[in-house]
Image (cartoon, rainbow, N blue to C red):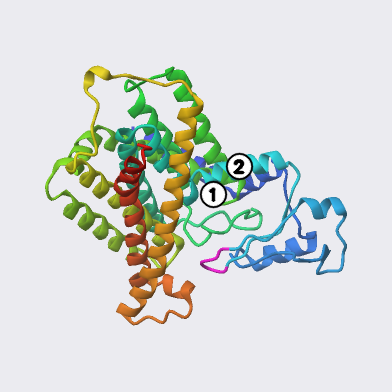
Amino acid sequence: MRAAMGAAYARLLRLADSLQDPEKVARFQRLCGVQSSASPAEQTENQAAGDGPRHRGNRQHNGVLENGAARTAEEQRRLQPLRRNSLTGEEGQLFSIRRPLLYLLFSLGTELGNELFYISFFPFWIWNVDAHVGRRVVVVWVWVMYLGQCTKDLIRLPRPPSPPVLKLEVFYNSEYGMPSTHAMSGTAIPLSLLLLTWGRWQYPFFAGLLLAVVWCSLVCLSRVYMGMHSILDVVAGVLYAILILIVFHPALDIIDNFNLTYKYAPLIIISLHLALGIFSFTLDTWSTSRGDTAEILGSGAGIACGSHVSYMLGFLKEPSPDTLPFTIPPFTVTLLGKAMLRVFIGLVVLLLIRAVMKMITIPMACKVFGIPCDDIRKARQRMEVELPYRYLTYGTVGFAVMFFIPYLFTWIGLH
């Protein structure tokens, strides 16, 4: 029995090593038409220099390489510009795309795990579809992302090295790789939507399951395509998200009811999310995961507190059980027009709130803690600045999503 377990463990380790192989990522990129723009000699030099987020490979000036070789017009057209991380100053590699449709598809997939998607999708769902489901999905998203980011900093497994992998994006290159939080959110969000809407809304279960599988697959494949994760990172992210969903899904009704009805819920919510944010800042040296974690926790706290205030003031009214399940209404011009108008007005207000809060919180934190504010990028890497800036800014944004903007819609007749 012990020998069998030992053999199974050895096979599992060999499988993990195989899935972590960066050559598999590089082969997938080449299969999808991604090629390096560096010459063979420079690729050898890059390999000798080792992987570094600031190593740029072969640069170009007006279509001419530094070694003097000229590019053809077709190569120049396909060449992608350097990607730059505005927070760290890191710059990516030059690469050429042979299959532009795949590049666009996987760029869309990777955006499904970025801030622009979150700040658009969650408000759209809450304002136009079903706030009851939206609140619960946000709870799942907060815990999945928080646990994923903390696990990265505990395991500390690096991302695939470059070379042989081409880094098509560098924004998250300062973070560790295991597990992929893009894969976690790309698994948890569609699956939780499926679980929470099935039986509450009338639609074919197979259609919902197919959408969840396509969503998850697109996000996961995009992270390998972008060169940001190994296959092992992605697989671990999917399995980890499913495990978290299994644990939290049965408790979602209890959590949501507490957020809405308990008298001191806002105090407990703010304290808990702030404590979790402080803990995550002590796990490792600075990386973009620190700010992302504070941003996620702030958004979750703001949405929960906004839900509580809306409920206490009588703005949140749940339908009676005899009205369930809901039927999907016909897509009329009026319905689509109102939905688009709510999204447009709401997102404009959210972006204004975010910009104003950013202008206020960063200088305020620098002044309170005596941190020079002449270099915003360096100042934001300090815990004393980044934690209050992200937490307060996105907490206010989350609160506006659940309370201020729905009240605005009611006032102007768009509710």
As for residue 105 lying within the magenta part, the answer is no
Label 1 crowd (10 A; few <14 / some 14-19 / many >=20): many
Q: Which amino acid does label 2 sit on?
A: Phe
Residue assigned mark 1 = 229
First to last magenta residue range:
85-89
Q: In which quarter of the image is the C terminus?
A: top left
Q: Does the magenta stretch include residue 87?
A: yes
Q: Is residue 205 above or below residue 382?
A: above
Give the residue displayed 39% in from the left and 32% down from the top: 129
Position of residue 257 in the picture relative to residue 203 (left or right): left
Q: Disc 2 designates what residue?
A: 106
Q: Quadrant of residue 218?
A: top right
User: What residue is rendered at 79% in x and 60% in y?
Assistant: 39
- At label 2, counting other C-alpha atoms closer than 10 Å, the crowd grade (few under 14, some 14-19, many 20 or more) is many
Helix or strand or loop: what does disc 2 sit on?
helix
Specify whether 19 is left or right of 68.
left
The amino acid on which the numbered mark 1 sits, given as a three-letter code, is His
Which of label 1 and label 2 is nearer to you? Answer: 2
What is the CA distance from the residue labelled 1 to the residue labelled 2?
Answer: 14 Å
Q: Which of marks 1 and 2 is nearer the N terminus?
A: 2
Query: Is 125 placed above or below 198 here?
Result: below
What percent of the width, then of the height, locates residue 88? 53, 68
Q: Is residue 192 above or below residue 167?
A: above
